[in-house]
Amino acid sequence: MSVCLSARGLHLAFGGVRAADGIDLDVMTGEFLAIIGPNGAGKTTFINMTTGYLKPLAGSITFSGQSIIGLTPRRIVELGIARSFQLPQVFLEHSVLENVALAIAARTGFWKPSRPLLSPDVAAEAHDIIAKFGLADIADRGADTLNEGARKLTDIAMALALRPRLLLMDEPTSGVAAADKMEVVATLARVLREAGVTAVFVEHDMEVVDRFADRVAVWSQGRISALGTPGAVLSDPRVQRDVIGTRLVEAPHASA
Amino acid sequence: MMRAREILVAAVAAAAILLLTLAVPWLRFVFTIAIAKGITVLGILVLLRAGQVSFGHALYLSFGAYIVAFAAPFCPEALLLLPLAALGATLLGLVIGLFVSRYRDIFFGMLNLALSMVFYSTLEKFYSITHGTDGIRLARTTFLGMTLTPETQAWTALGLALLLAAVFAILVRIYLESPMGHGLSAIKTREARLEFMGISAQRVLLAAYVLSAFMAGCGGFIVAMATRQVTPSLAYWTASGELVFIAILGGTGSVLGPFLGAIAYELTRVYAAALFAEGWQMILGAVLLLVILFAPGGLWSILRRMARQRVGRDARP
């Protein structure tokens, strides 16, 4: 298995907070890698550095062997890295269908003023993607009228419509109704596996991590404190205490 | 179908303008200027889709008009002066657009205002070239080789204005339906996402800006042809404000809005000035206030609401 994304010695600090304090990580082609860890551990910072939004103070990131440090987000998208957002970033004056169609157009030909956005082939592909995410019923709804879960799925659908080789997802299931969550992730996982997309996702739901991740990386104060298969990492006492432990204690309260 | 109705409304309006002009000759000038402004406001509408308000677009209109005034003695053919004015305004729009498309909101608006005032001052101060506030009298022009009299020139200006208005309305409508057009409102709501889809938001806005400069240049040509005298006041900031005023008055929901707004504006101005020589601005202000309060979508939205009620009534058994 080849290395898809490789990070070496990433350092970044915001004032006194070390958001990345020596991150070394290899993401293998085709794998699903989950990132877990407490708030403020630097998980989103890693995604922001990988997509060109933030530039590390030191270290290197290569994608398929090519350095992407210093490249703009736009250039990195062209190389084949897409992302979805913790807070969904959708175009609020557009419908779900148009949002996805804009992403498809961005990939297939954006600069043709004579071709309508919803040309037959783009519209067909958009409907196809929307159906995969179970959003067909609300395809024509304005994005500003959606609930958080639907907005989140639209956001991910837009990233996937770019047909990336690597997809970075920041908390893809937060905001999605608990009852639908597993079904949504299963669908998402199937779509990604079919397309052969490598996926890195930040996740707080350990059940999702356990079921869908090939490997888990545990973030802690800007470092990776554990890395391995879900079975090994999630049963590690240290990880249970620092990352999952509090959740297990909280769980009875939440269900009570 | 919305599109069919828009075309019908436009055709009826164009016919009405021609008939009214034949019946009431002095309206010809009013309508010609209104349509020239409408074409320019169409460019403002495109920028408004991206949430950006230019308070300096009279720059491109006046630039086009001055190109016509400067070039007419050497090249009197109207059909050459038109592309010359359009090209000049487009190039200026490209150079300035590369700069201002990096800015948003109040900075975008104010930079446009500042640059238009720089041009105004240039026109006013370089008396030996521009004749200052006296302006330049347009040399005699020709149309397809035929020398135009003041009378035929006025008809030529109106005819070309109507033709350009129709062409631009159709083109802008197609453009707004394209990904580039939809990209404008994407800039308004989530500009960063465009970048994360591999699309340069700045380039989306620049394309719109250059298009708006191009149309304003054509508007400037018509103004020069109709008034036969170009003065720096064309570039003054109140002229730019007037364009934004018309955009809001007409509404941004349709490409016909700017023309509706421009005609309503010019007619209101003419009649208000005739009734209250000193207070016509007050009447214009009151009209805009009423529109903003009771029809935020502009005159176009009022028209559409009326049409819809009519359809609803007819449909009832």
Image (cartoon, coloured by chain):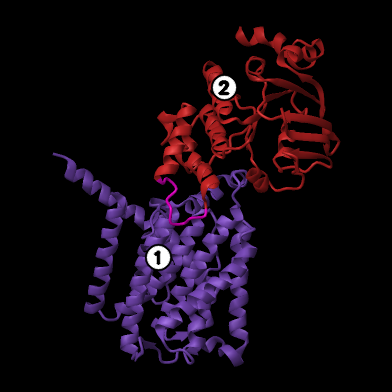
Chain colours: A red, B purple
Which residue is located at x 48 percent, y 58 percent?
A: B46
Q: Which residues are magenta?
A: A111-119
Which residue is located at x 59 percent, y 62 percent?
A: B109
- Report the disc number at residue B113: none
- Per the image, the residue denoted by label 1 is B168
Residue B205 horizontal/vertical position (percent): 56, 57
Q: Secondary structure at mark 1?
A: helix
In the depicted structure, whether residue B206 falls above or below residue B278 = above
**Which quarter of the rendering shows the N terminus of chain A?**
top right
Instruction: Please tell me whether mark 2 or mark 1 is closer to you in this view.
Output: 2
The amino acid marked with disc number 1 is: Phe
Q: Secondary structure at mark 2?
A: helix
- Per the image, the residue denoted by label 2 is A185
In the depicted structure, whether residue A106 falls above or below residue A45 = below
Specify few, some or many for label 2: CA neighbours under 10 Å numbering under 14, 14-19, or 20 or more: some
- Count of marks placed on residues: 2
Q: CA distance from mark 2 to mark 1?
A: 48 Å
Residue B40 magenta-highlighted: no
Which residue is located at x 45 percent, y 65 percent?
A: B41
**Residue A85: quarter of image:** top right
In the depicted structure, whether residue B103 falls above or below residue B92 = above
The amino acid marked with disc number 2 is: Val
Q: Nearer the viewer, residue B297 or A94?
A: A94
CB atoms at circles 2 and 1 under 8 Å apart?
no
> Could you tell me which chain the residue with mark 2 belongs to?
A
**Which quarter of the rendering shows the C terminus of chain A?**
top right
> Could you tell me which chain the residue with mark 1 belongs to?
B
